[in-house]
Image: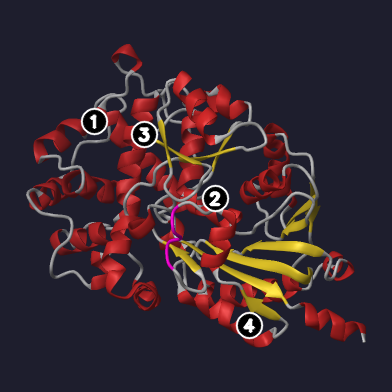
Amino acid sequence: MRQSPPLRGAGWNVTPGAQVAAAIEILSAVDSGGRPADETAALYFRRRRYIGAKDRAEIARHLYDVLRHRAALDWWIARLAADMPAAAARTRALASLVLIAGWPPDRVARCLDGGRFHPAPLSPAEARLVHGLAGRTLHHPDMPRAVRNDVPEWLLPPLERALGAGLEREIAGLNRPAPVDLRANPLKTDRAAAQRRLAAEGVDAEPTPWSPLGLRLEARAPLAALAAFREGLVEVQDEGSQVAALLADARPGMRVVDFCAGAGGKTLALAAQMRNRGKLVACDVAPHRLERAGRRLRRAGVDNVERRALTGAHDPWVKRHKQSFDRVFVDAPCLGTGTWRRNPDAKWRLQPRDLAELTACQRDILKSAARLVRPGGRLVYATCSLLREENEDQAAAFLAETPDFAPVPAALVWKETIGGNPPPGSGRYLRLTPARHGTDGFFVAIFERRTASFEQERQ
C-alpha cells in the first residue's frame, strides 16, 4: 500500500474529508491487495500512528459500511449511473455516504473538494449519482433477494437451507458490527475480578449471557495498552468461540489435542480449563501461526502446551498417537459465514468451488482426527459456519462412516460443563447465530468413541 501524506488537521484531528479519503484508500487496497480488510486497515493505521482512536473509528465505519453492503450499493450504482464503474472503491464510498451514512449531497461535495488530504472533487457523473441517491433507502423492493440481503447470489440457496424463514433476520444480524468480547483467564483471575480491573482502567464491560467467562465491552478500547490485557488476565475471544471451547470439557490431567489450532485462541481456552495440568498438543499445518500462539500462551501463563506443526491431516504423528487422547478438538477450516460481522469482505472473496473443497477437507480432517481419540474419549467438531453442508451434513456423514463413535447431545454436555442458563436449543448439536444469541455463528458437534470397539480390536 502506498504511503499517503499525514492526515493532520488542526489539533491533530483528521477532517471528515480526510477520513473519507483514508477509507477510499483502504478500500482500494483491499480490492487489489488480496489481504483481508482487518489486516489491510491495521497496516494502514500502523503506518499512521498520528491518527487518533476516534478518527480511526470513523474511517473504519466508512470502510465496513461499504464491505457489508457492497451488493446493494452496486445495484444502486448500476441503476442510476450505468456508465460509472460500480466496482471502483470511490464510487462505492460515495454511494455509501448517501445511502448508509445519510449525508446530503452538499456535505459530500464539501468533503470531496480536492482540499489538502481530501479526495478530488466530484465529477459531473459522480455529482449526478450523489443527487440521484439523495432521499433513497439502501434496500429497494426491486432488488433480488441476494442483493437485498447483501450476500453472493450463489450462497443464497445454502443460506436459505440453513436459516429458512429466519434468513433475513440472521443476515441483518451478520450485517451489524460485532461487539468486542473478552474471556477472563481462569489461570490468573475470575470474571468479576477481571471486570473490576478493566473498570479501574476506564473500560466498562458486562458479563456475557452464555459464557461464564465472557465480558462484553460497552465501547471499543485500545486493548493492547491495557495492563489487564498485557498481564494475560483477559483474551479477545467471541462468546460463541468461548462456548465451543467449554463444550470440549477438557479437564485437568487429561491428554487433549487442538487439531487445527491456528493462532491459539481456543488452545488458550482449553489450557485454562485444564488448569495447566495434563498435556495439550496444539497442531496446525502453518508453523507461523503456531509461533504467534506461543506469544499468547506465555502471556496467559500457560505451560502445558506442546506446539506441533503437521504436514497435513495424515501426518505420521497422528498414526503414532492413535487412540491416545481424551479429547480432540477440531475447529475446522470453513467458509466462515458465521464471522461476517467481523469479516464482511470475506463473503465477496468466496467462490462456489471453495465450498466443495472445504467440505472435502473437513471430512478428511474429521476422519484423521478421530484416530487420536481413545475409547471413551470425545471428538469435538466445531465451525464458525452457518451452512448445513459444513455442519449437520458433516456430522451425519461422519457418524455413518465411523460406527464406533456415537453423538453426545450438546445440551447434556452444556449442563455438565457450563450450567447456569439453560442451553440455547435442546437438539443433538449446538448452533449459535448472531440474531438469536448475539454471538458469531458457531456449530458444535460432540462424538464419543465407544469403548466396545477397543475391546474388539484387542481380541
Mark 3 is on which residue type? Glu
Local packing at callout 3 (Cα closer than 10 Å; few below 14, some 14-19, many 20+) is: few
Indicate the quadrant containing the C terminus: top left, top right, bottom left or bottom right. bottom right
In this figure, which residue is indicated by the disc labeled 1? 114
- Circles 4 and 1, Cβ within 8 Å, touching? The answer is no
Please state if 309 lies on the left or on the right of 344 as rendered.
right
Give the mark, 4 or 1, whose residue is nearer the N terminus: 1
Give the mark, 2 or 4, whose residue is nearer the N terminus: 2
* SS for dot 4: helix
Compare residues 24 and 398 and report the one nearer the observer: 398
What predominant SS class does the magenta segment belong to? loop
**Mark 3 against mark 1, which lies toward the viewer?**
3
**Mark 1 against mark 2, which lies toward the viewer?**
2
Q: Is residue 91 above or below residue 321?
A: above
* SS for dot 3: loop
Please state if 27 lies on the left or on the right of 404 as rendered.
left
In this figure, which residue is indicated by the disc labeled 2? 242
Check residue 399 in the rendering and tell me which mark sits there, or answer none.
4
Mark 4 is on which residue type? Leu
Q: Residue at x 44, y 67 (%)?
A: 386
- Label 4, label 1: how far apart the Cα atoms are: 63 Å
Q: Residue at x 41, y 56 (%)?
A: 340
